[in-house]
């Protein structure tokens, strides 16, 4: 039976040149205890005067099979919203060095924002074209489909994701255990109380990409090689795990092994059940550590939210490791532990 992941409208910070609005919102939420309720209700309770409701909604992750945003704020096991571990890392890096923090946010969005990935993929494939970006970037009108963003043969919203569902949303499809992508009910409807579906909010992350040097003032993309590989589906497992480790590490370089390895599988479109995942994780770490593909430098116990430790050892939930190129072969060898015939293509 097909299960569908539903996308809400794209939502980012509404002052398009102020990505730090998201950091300020995360800072407020991080100082509060986890709260239950809808993303809209939480934004109204906690973020009034900090960021607009529309801008706040883009921070949130999955609500069952509905994806409002990019997952910097996620639900815990009790259904309460909390700032994610990766968002905590981004927030800390931003406080230490704002320029570096915004660059890391840009990299996070290239990996995690389904809407931004759609736009970048279409631009890379030359299906869509930025037209007059130098004028768009200096005006308040923002990106407009048909004028400053030429959609050509993919102008109808129903065709935007055609053929790109996996590349744009593989991680989220895997996390939600879904195999199809669609707009949330009501997104395409024209109601007086709601905006029509628009790509204009993507102006904000594009300006962020320009500010870190990944988009020229004339609209030419220049993504770092590792992000381009992730976007286009040519990233290797070793590269993907290295990037995930870097993005989730605390100030000492430790990461929670289970969440990072789950995200690694999700990068390749897979999210197994707990039993299969444990079997795969043990097989992978055992072979990788024996052959030197994964160099374990240190291990520590963690908290319940950090999941199982290496080989189910609660004293080995947090790890410092170095990933070597041999990990690519080890990752492929461990695939059989999932009892799947699926072969990697990236």
Image (tube, helix red, strand yellow):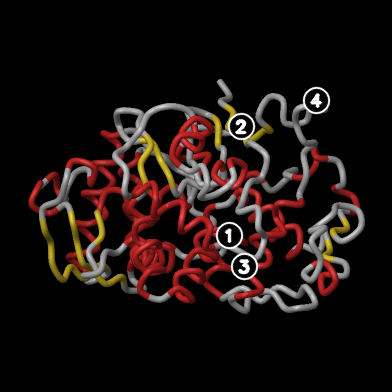
- x%, y% of residue 236? 46, 65
Dots 4 and 2: beta carbons under 8 Å?
Answer: no
Residue at 17% of width from left, 65% of height from top?
A: 290
Task: Report, in whole angstroms, how far the alpha carbon at label 2 lies from the one at label 1.
Answer: 22 Å
N-terminal label among 4 and 3: 4
Task: Report, in whole angstroms, how far the alpha carbon at label 2 lies from the one at label 3.
Answer: 26 Å
Say above or below: 22 vs 92. Answer: above
Helix, strand, or loop for circle 3?
helix
Q: Disc 4 vs disc 2: which is toward the camera?
A: 4
N-terminal label among 2 and 1: 2
Dots 2 and 3: beta carbons under 8 Å?
Answer: no
N-terminal label among 3 and 1: 3
Residue with the mark numbered 2: 6
Indicate the quadrant where residue 194 lies. top right
Residue with the mark numbered 1: 233
Res 189 seen here: yes
Residue at 16% of width from left, 71% of height from top?
A: 297
Residue with the mark numbered 3: 208
- x%, y% of residue 105? 50, 63
Res 177 seen here: no
- x%, y% of residue 115? 65, 49
Residue with the mark numbered 4: 191
Q: Disc 4 vs disc 1: which is toward the camera?
A: 4
Crowd tier of the residue under label 4, counting other residues whose Cα lies within 10 Å: few below 14, some 14–19, many 20 or above:
few
Crowd tier of the residue under label 1, counting other residues whose Cα lies within 10 Å: few below 14, some 14–19, many 20 or above:
some
**On the rendered structure, is 66 left or right of 297?**
right
Q: Residue furthest top?
A: 1
Q: Disc 2 vs disc 3: which is toward the camera?
A: 3
């Amino acid at each position: 039976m097909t299960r569908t992941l539903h996308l809400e409208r794209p939502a980012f910070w509404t002052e398009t040149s102020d990505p730090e609005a998201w950091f300020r919102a995360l800072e407020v939420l991080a100082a509060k205890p986890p709260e239950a309720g809808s993303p809209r209700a939480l934004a109204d309770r906690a973020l009034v005067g900090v960021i607009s409701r529309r801008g706040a909604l883009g921070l949130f992750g999955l609500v069952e099979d509905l994806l409002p945003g990019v997952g910097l704020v996620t639900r815990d096991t009790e259904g309460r919203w909390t700032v994610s571990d990766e968002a905590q890392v981004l927030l800390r890096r931003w406080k230490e060095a704002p320029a570096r923090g915004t660059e890391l946010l840009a990299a996070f969005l290239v990996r995690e924002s389904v809407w931004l990935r759609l736009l970048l993929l279409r631009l890379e494939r030359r299906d869509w074209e930025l037209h007059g970006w130098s004028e768009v970037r200096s005006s308040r009108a923002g990106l407009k489909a048909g004028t400053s963003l030429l959609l050509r043969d993919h102008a109808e919203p129903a065709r935007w994701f055609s053929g790109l569902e996996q590349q744009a949303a593989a991680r989220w499809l895997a996390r939600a255990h879904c195999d199809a992508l669609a707009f949330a009910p009501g997104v395409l409807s024209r109601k007086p109380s709601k905006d029509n579906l628009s790509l204009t909010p993507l102006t904000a992350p594009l300006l962020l990409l320009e500010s870190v040097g990944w988009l020229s003032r004339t609209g030419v993309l220049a993504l770092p090689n590792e992000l381009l590989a992730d976007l286009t589906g040519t990233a290797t497992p070793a590269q993907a795990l290295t990037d995930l480790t870097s993005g989730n590490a605390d100030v000492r370089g430790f990461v929670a092994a289970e969440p990072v390895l789950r995200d690694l599988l999700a990068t390749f479109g897979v999210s197994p059940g707990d039993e299969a995942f444990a079997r795969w994780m043990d097989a992978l770490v055992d072979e990788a550590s024996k052959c030197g593909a994964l160099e374990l430098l240190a291990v520590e116990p963690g908290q319940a939210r950090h999941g199982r430790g290496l080989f189910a050892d609660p004293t080995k939930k947090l790890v410092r490791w170095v990933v070597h190129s041999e990990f690519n072969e080890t990752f492929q060898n461990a695939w059989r532990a999932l009892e799947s015939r699926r072969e990697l293509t990236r």
